[in-house]
Image: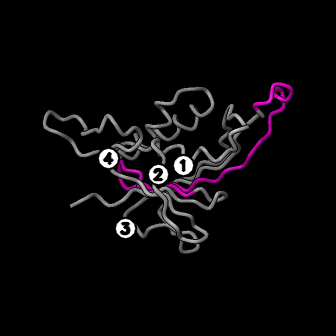
Amino acid sequence: MADLDDTLERIRRGYHALGVGAHRDVVAMFEGGEPEREGGEPERDAGAPGRTGGEWSVIDLVDGHRYAPRELVAMDLFGSLPSHWQLVGVDVEHWHRGPWRRLLGFGPAVDGAESLVVSGHYRARPRAPEWRWHVERVPFIHIWCLAGARVKSVSSYLDAIEVRRLPAAA
């Protein structure tokens, strides 16, 4: 249970860090549950930030097409704002944890998994100097599938994408 609580705390810190420049906390949302090396520390690939503990796939939930993730997998989930907008913060309004249920047939079937539904609004503003004072609220709903300390997948309901951890290579 402590592993799951640690994972939930990492996710909570990651949402808080969005827009304030604490990139390490955002990347940490996708880490956890890595296989350990001798000496008790997690095995990490320093050349692949945000991908430790397994590779990821991005799935379009409308047509089922699979895409390779960006270099930083967190950007696939949080990088959907157009480039002329700047993310300045996140307001998490709902945080609900419960047993994993597939939503309308989307998402992997995972036995013994927990779900975390996080919804709220991004705060974003245009990058144009004359409009920098104007802040818009952009809604989001993220559905996390957690198995122990590992994030198995995250679906962005409004963007119709899923970031899914690929099965470990045998």
Q: Is residue 133 found inside the magenta-colored segment of the image? A: yes
Give left or right: position of 89 versus 26.
right
Q: Quadrant of residue 143?
A: bottom right
Residue 42: x %, y % from top left: 25, 38
Name the secondary structure under disc 3.
loop
Q: Is residue 112 positioned above or below 96 on the image?
A: below
Q: Earlier in the sequence, mark 4 or mark 1?
A: 4
| Up-down relation of residue 167 to residue 44 (above or below) | below
Question: Picture coordinates of residue 123 (x, y %)?
Answer: 72, 37
Q: Residues within 10 Å of mark 3 (few under 14, many from 20)?
A: few
For mark 3, what is the residue? 111
Residue type at mark 1 is Asp
Per the rendered image, the range of residues in magenta is: 127-155
Which residue, given by chain and number where applicable, does mark 2 sit on? Answer: 69
Mark nearest the camera among 4 and 1 is: 1
Of labels 4 and 2, earlier in sequence is 4
Residue at 65 percent of width and 50 percent of height: 119
Foreground disc of the pair 3, 4: 4
* Neighbourhood count class around disc 1 (C-alpha, 10 Å): few under 14, some 14–19, many 20 upward: some
Determine which of the numbered discs, if any, sits on residue 53 in the image: 4
> Which coloring applies here?
one colour
Q: Is residue 104 above or below residue 143?
A: below
Instruction: Specify which label sits upstream in the sequence, 2 or 1.
Output: 2
Q: CA distance from mark 4 to mark 1?
A: 17 Å
Cα separation, mark 1 vs mark 3, equals 25 Å
The structure residue drawn at horizontal position 31% and vertical position 34%, both measured from the top left corner, is: 46
- Observer-nearest residue: 12 or 161? 161
Marks 3/4: CA distance? Answer: 20 Å
